[in-house]
Image (cartoon, helix red, strand yellow):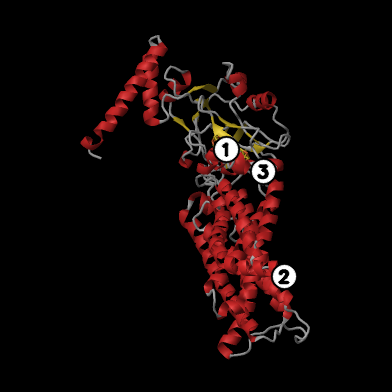
């Protein structure tokens, strides 16, 4: 479209935006109002920035593989036997004497493009607009597990007690009261940092900006919101020639998905 | 080590039965539409009728299986009701699929009703009227049912293919594979029922010999169609494996579960390829060629006659089994 042809429309849009901004300033009252208005504008533009998006940064250099988070999660969310919301994977790599063991805490990535939400046939699972947490509406879910098939991170399970799909919800009940999730609370090495990744003043935002972070399986395009420092994604299937790799997951009795 | 499977036999059965029903209706509708007033339809009327009667049954059984597989069976209606406007624009294949099933079941049932012998069922004027109405409605219903049936068959594959996290499923070849298999299993079901029905007294012992030559001609057409479908399916399976190999990465790793040495290799090579495709292709191909090349009459021993379609149906189940289970025991490579 040329500039001339759409100018009436864009002028109208512009005026509308101005008035929205003005309203926000007026209601905001304090100096933050202007910033708020800017946030509204940018969120209208990108659809992502400026929204609250809770996420986690896990500094793998600090993780000691103690599984305290796994246990805390089990207790906090009353996760039944046999299933897990959050766990720590062990990866053994190298050949004697140059061997190492690294730890990889896993949890739902609260993806910005969650595939689990795309496939859900009932709308039971959705991304909460207010904080970006992906939840399962227990009143709607039919337990078809399509979401569990679709998650590239294997983060969903059928709750054997309630019979609906279940997953990590970043301890929504704690977060709503201003607390951090239970796994973050309990972490001995302070490897887990929780916060709003879109808030420039938050610790997590600053750490993400200043560190070489990576996410798991980025190529799936799910845009995870759980970031890692020092992530090594090598597993048995992607090891380099001569390398010894063994990964132990939460599934003690069954094979890891190859 | 055991595997962690989230979808098992009910889903496998559902995918197979939905494909079978869709295939039967598609074949029946195509026969009806082929030549609405002509010779072929008169001869093949039985095929159209059987297809129409077979069609809705497996679909409803398969759906019931799936519903009882759900973690929360009594909530199944949420598929259709939880939020109408959301549903309408919801891209979830399972949601679209449940609408397809509903529509398919309704239309296929109406279509099947047009084949009932109304005159024999209801005496007097009502029977006459319904028979006349059935005649009028049959072709329009077939026009609706054929595309719906094909959509159903494709949907059973899209349900799986829509999931990038399962590299074995996430391939554009899967719908072709499932659609060809659906039509070939539907056709086999028709042929099988037809053969059971025509094991008549008066036939030579141990052989099907319906005196009406039209019957043999129809059989000949049907069986040739089936052999062509088998060959097509073999080609598509080749494509399926080739595509995964060309895609490399996780897809290549995933398809290795089907190749020799893989965990699903026996089920795949023996169940799907050997019993489900090669065996019936050789049996039926032999008798077809005997007629086509040597000019013999098209007839064969009853046991062989019945075992070929059974083998194809078995192969259809195994195909769904191999794909559904193989897709779940493989996954993205790398952490
Ligand atoms: S990690 Fe899996 S379950 Fe969590 S939001 Fe992403 S796709 Fe959904
Ligand atoms: S199991 Fe529940 S949340 Fe998951 S796709 Fe099915 S209805 Fe949606």
User: Sequence-wise, which precedes: disc 3 or disc 2?
Assistant: 3
Q: In this view, does B164 lie above or below A196?
A: below
Foreground residue among B54 and A41: B54
| Disc number placed over residue B76 in the picture, else none | 3
Q: What separation in Å lies between label 3 and label 1 (alpha carbons)?
A: 13 Å
Q: In the rendering, at what x and y percent does residue A136 appear?
A: 61, 33
Q: Is residue B312 above or below residue A247?
A: below
Q: Pinpoint the chain carrying mark 2.
A: B
User: Sequence-wise, which precedes: disc 1 or disc 2?
Assistant: 1
Q: Can residue B153 be seen in this view?
A: yes
- Which image quarter is the C terminus of chain B in? top right
User: Sequence-wise, which precedes: disc 3 or disc 1?
Assistant: 3
Q: Pinpoint the chain carrying mark 3.
A: B
Element type where label 2 sits in the image: loop
Element type where label 1 sits in the image: loop
Q: Is residue A18 above or below residue A94?
A: above
Q: Name the residue under label 2.
A: B124
Q: Mark 1 points at which residue?
A: B83
In this view, the mark in front (3 or 1): 1
């Amino acid at each position: 479209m040329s500039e001339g042809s759409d100018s009436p429309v864009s002028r109208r849009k512009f005026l509308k935006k101005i008035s929205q901004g003005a309203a926000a300033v007026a209601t905001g009252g304090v100096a933050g109002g202007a910033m708020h208005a800017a946030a509204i504008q940018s969120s209208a533009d990108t659809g992502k920035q400026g929204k609250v998006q809770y996420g986690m940064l896990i500094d793998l250099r600090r993780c000691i593989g103690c599984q305290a988070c796994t246990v805390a999660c089990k207790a906090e969310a009353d996760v039944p036997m046999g299933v897990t919301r959050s766990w720590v994977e062990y990866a053994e790599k190298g050949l004697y004497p140059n061997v190492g063991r690294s730890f990889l805490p896993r949890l739902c990535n609260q993806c910005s493009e969650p595939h689990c939400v795309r496939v859900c046939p009932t709308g039971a699972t959705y991304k909460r607009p207010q904080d970006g947490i992906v939840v399962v509406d227990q009143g709607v879910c039919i337990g078809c597990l399509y979401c569990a098939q679709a998650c590239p991170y294997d983060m969903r399970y059928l709750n054997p007690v309630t019979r609906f799909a279940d997953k990590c919800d970043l301890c929504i009940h704690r977060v709503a009261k201003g607390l951090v999730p239970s796994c973050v609370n309990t972490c001995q090495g302070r490897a887990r940092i929780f916060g709003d990744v879109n808030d420039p003043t938050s610790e997590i935002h600053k750490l993400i900006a200043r560190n070489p972070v990576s996410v798991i399986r980025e190529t799936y395009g799910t845009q995870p919101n759980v970031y890692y420092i020092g992530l090594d994604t090598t597993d048995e299937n992607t090891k380099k020639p001569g390398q010894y790799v063994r990964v132990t997951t939460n599934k003690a009795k069954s094979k890891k998905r190859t | 080590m055991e595997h962690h499977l989230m979808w098992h036999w009910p889903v496998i059965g559902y995918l197979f039965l939905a494909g079978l029903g869709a295939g039967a209706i598609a074949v029946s509708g195509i026969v009806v539409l082929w030549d609405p007033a002509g010779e072929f339809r008169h001869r093949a009327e039985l095929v159209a009728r059987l297809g129409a009667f077979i069609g809705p049954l497996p679909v409803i059984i398969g759906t019931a299986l799936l519903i009882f597989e759900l973690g929360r069976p009594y909530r199944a209606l949420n598929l259709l009701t939880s939020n109408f406007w959301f549903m309408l624009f919801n891209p979830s294949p399972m949601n679209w699929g449940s609408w397809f099933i509903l529509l398919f079941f309704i239309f296929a049932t109406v279509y099947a009703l047009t084949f009932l012998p109304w005159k024999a069922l209801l005496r007097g004027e009502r029977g006459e009227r319904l028979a006349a109405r059935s005649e009028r409605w049959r072709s329009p219903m077939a026009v609706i049912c054929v595309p719906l049936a094909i959509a159903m068959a494709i949907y059973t594959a899209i349900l799986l293919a829509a999931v990038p996290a399962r590299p074995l499923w996430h391939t554009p070849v899967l719908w072709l594979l499932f659609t060809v298999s659906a039509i070939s299993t539907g056709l086999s079901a028709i042929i099988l029922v037809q053969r059971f029905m025509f094991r008549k007294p008066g036939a030579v012992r141990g052989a099907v010999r319906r005196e009406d030559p039209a019957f043999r001609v129809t059989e000949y057409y049907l069986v040739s169609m089936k052999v062509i479908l088998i060959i097509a399916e073999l080609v598509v399976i080749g494509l399926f494996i080739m595509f995964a190999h060309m895609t490399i990465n996780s897809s290549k790793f995933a398809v290795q579960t089907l190749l020799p040495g893989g965990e699903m290799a026996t089920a795949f090579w023996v169940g799907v390829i050997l019993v489900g495709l090669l065996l019936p292709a050789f049996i039926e191909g032999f008798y077809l060629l005997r007629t086509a090349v040597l000019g013999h009459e098209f007839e064969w021993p009853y046991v062989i006659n019945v075992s070929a379609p059974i083998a194809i149906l078995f192969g259809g189940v195994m195909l769904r089994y191999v794909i559904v289970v193989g897709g779940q025991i493989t996954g993205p490579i790398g952490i």
